[in-house]
Amino acid sequence: MKSKKMIIATMVFGMAVTGSAGVYAGTNLQKISAYLNHSIGFKVNGAAYTPVDNNGKKLAPITYNDTTYLPVRAMADALKVPVTFDPSTNQVVLGSGAGTTTPGNGSAVTLAAVQYSAAQKEAITKAFSAFQGFETAYAPLQMTSGDSFQKVAGGSDGVRFLFSHMSVDISPRDYAYEYDGTTVKLSTGAAGKWYTPSDIPMLTFKLDDRYVTLSSPDKTLSKAQLEQVAAGVAKLSK
């Protein structure tokens, strides 16, 4: 039992220091001196396993104060354990009992943290800086499990985030008002509106001084999935 508790604790810490720190509040970060331990190998159910990040880059355990910390997302994926990050509470959630939601059809919506690189954060900040009075950068901080961030682009009236299976537009203008639709309440308490200007349903809601619109151009994601992703759109930490 002691070893099991140790593994869970170290996995959580491992996520905080191996790529997801960008989504945490900076006021609670503590600088440490640690070592990447490349001498440790992995086996999962008897087979050799190499943990990698979302870009396929090999990950190494971290050794700190005689304790080894593992990359939580890679290990959770290998062990088939759902892992999500809730940006509203700054909590890493392991397992299916929490961190997932159940739509009306009974299937679970599993979310994953979006891990923006330094270059991607710079591109996002630059895209927002082109708009006077709209310079504060916002971004989706979570996505459905299995999706991946592709690029960000600034347009004439806002900033668009493109993922493999969804599009997120953040604009100072509300383009949903002219369409009939259905009002929904997001988990954050914000009121959203579903409408279909073409053949692709879109969800728009107001966030502070801007409007966020989500859709799934390839129609892979359900409305329930997009509503959960919407709850994770927030200011982008540096």
Image (cartoon, rainbow, N blue to C red):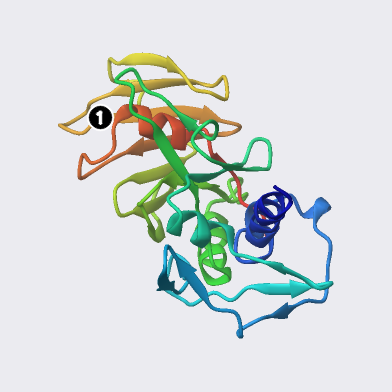
Furthest-bottom residue in this view: 39
Which residue is found at the position 54% from the left and 21% from the top?
190
Q: Judge whether residue 56 can be spotted in this image.
A: yes
| Image-based side of 236 in relation to 65, left or right | left
- Quarter of the image for residue 174 reads top left
Which residue is found at the position 30% from the left and 31% from the top?
202
Neighbour class for label 1 at 10 Å: few (<14), some, many (≥20)?
Answer: some
Q: Judge whether residue 175 can be spotted in this image.
A: no
Q: How many marks?
A: 1
Q: Secondary structure at mark 1?
A: loop
Q: Position of residue 126 (x, y in %)?
A: 54, 63
Q: Position of residue 46 (x, y in %)?
A: 42, 68
**What residue is pinned by disc 1?**
201
Task: Tell me the kind of residue under disc 1.
Answer: Pro
Furthest-left residue in this view: 199
| Image-based side of 120 in relation to 136, left or right | left
In the image, residue 160 sits, relative to residue 195, either above or below, namely below
| Image-based side of 72 in relation to 159, left or right | right
Q: Position of residue 227 (x, y in %)?
A: 42, 29
In the image, residue 97 sits, relative to residue 78, either above or below, namely above
In the image, residue 220 sits, relative to residue 196, either above or below, namely below
Q: Quadrant of the C terminus?
A: bottom right
Q: Position of residue 107 (x, y in %)?
A: 33, 28
Closer-to-camera residue (18/49): 49
Closer-to-camera residue (146/24): 146
Which residue is found at the position 58% from the left and 46% from the top?
134
- Quarter of the image for residue 169 reads top left
| Image-based side of 90 in relation to 109, left or right | right
Closer-to-camera residue (36/174): 36
Closer-to-camera residue (116/161): 116
